[in-house]
């Protein structure tokens, strides 16, 4: 039996609600499903919402289930296809997408290596020194400048 992951419509007129289901590919859209793995609610306010059981979706993909274009788009945005491609299994069971922002759960790249920061040296506060002592230190360092200072005074 060939299986397909696709959307099954529910809701009333102008208020669609879709279940993400696994069905036999020969069954009509509203026919019996093998399993419901999530939902997609595009008319939700304030933002559209979608949620998928990632473990069950990965299990069906490993068994060879094909996806409709819309289901592929939703699963891609939720990160399920990344796990399928890499062969990884996320820690969280469900992935939720609200609006258009994806929380990247279960598949986090390792952080870049941190460079060692130099140790911070505490600054020493200089004490106030009398002006005569500064002139004496200047005279010791450069006698020519010291003579010029004494001649000018």
Image (cartoon, rainbow, N blue to C red):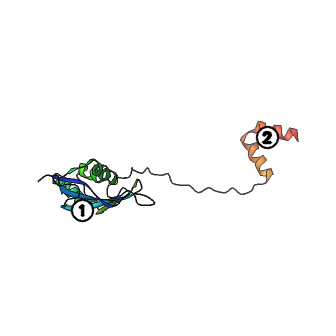
- Residue 119 numbered tag: none
Asked where in the image residue 104 lies, by quadrant, the reply is bottom left
Q: Look at mark 2 in the image and give the residue it sits on.
A: 146
Q: Quadrant of residue 7?
A: bottom left
Q: Is residue 101 left or right of residue 76?
A: right
Q: Is residue 8 visible?
A: yes
* Circle 1/circle 2 CB separation < 8 Å: no
Eye-nearest disc, 1 or 2: 1
Horizontal side of residue 55 vs 47, given as left or right: left
Tell me what residue is drawn at x 24 percent, y 60 percent: 55
Q: In the depicted view, which residue is nearer to us: 102 or 86?
A: 102
Residue at screen point 15% across, 52% down: 26
Q: How many marks?
A: 2
In the rendered image, the residue lying farthest to the front is: 13
Q: Residue at x 48, y 52 (%)?
A: 117
SS under mark 1: strand
In the rendered view, does 27 fall on the left or right side of 94? Answer: left
- Residue in view at x 79 percent, y 54 percent: 130
Location of the N terminus by quadrant is bottom left
Q: Which mark is residue 36?
A: 1
């Amino acid at each position: 039996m060939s299986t397909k992951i696709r959307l099954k419509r529910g809701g009333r007129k102008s208020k669609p609600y879709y279940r993400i289901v696994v069905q036999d590919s020969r069954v009509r859209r509203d026919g019996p499903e093998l399993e419901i793995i999530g939902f997609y609610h595009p008319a939700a306010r304030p933002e559209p919402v979608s949620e998928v059981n990632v473990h069950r979706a990965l299990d069906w993909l490993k068994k060879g289930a094909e996806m409709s274009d819309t289901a592929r788009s939703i699963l891609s945005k939720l990160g399920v296809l990344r796990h399928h491609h890499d062969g990884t299994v996320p820690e969280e069971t469900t992935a939720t997408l609200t609006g258009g922002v994806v929380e990247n759960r279960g598949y986090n790249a390792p952080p870049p290596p941190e460079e060692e920061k130099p140790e911070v040296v505490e600054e020493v506060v200089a004490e106030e020194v009398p002006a005569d002592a500064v002139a004496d230190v200047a005279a010791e360092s450069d006698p020519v400048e010291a003579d010029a200072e004494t001649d000018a005074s």
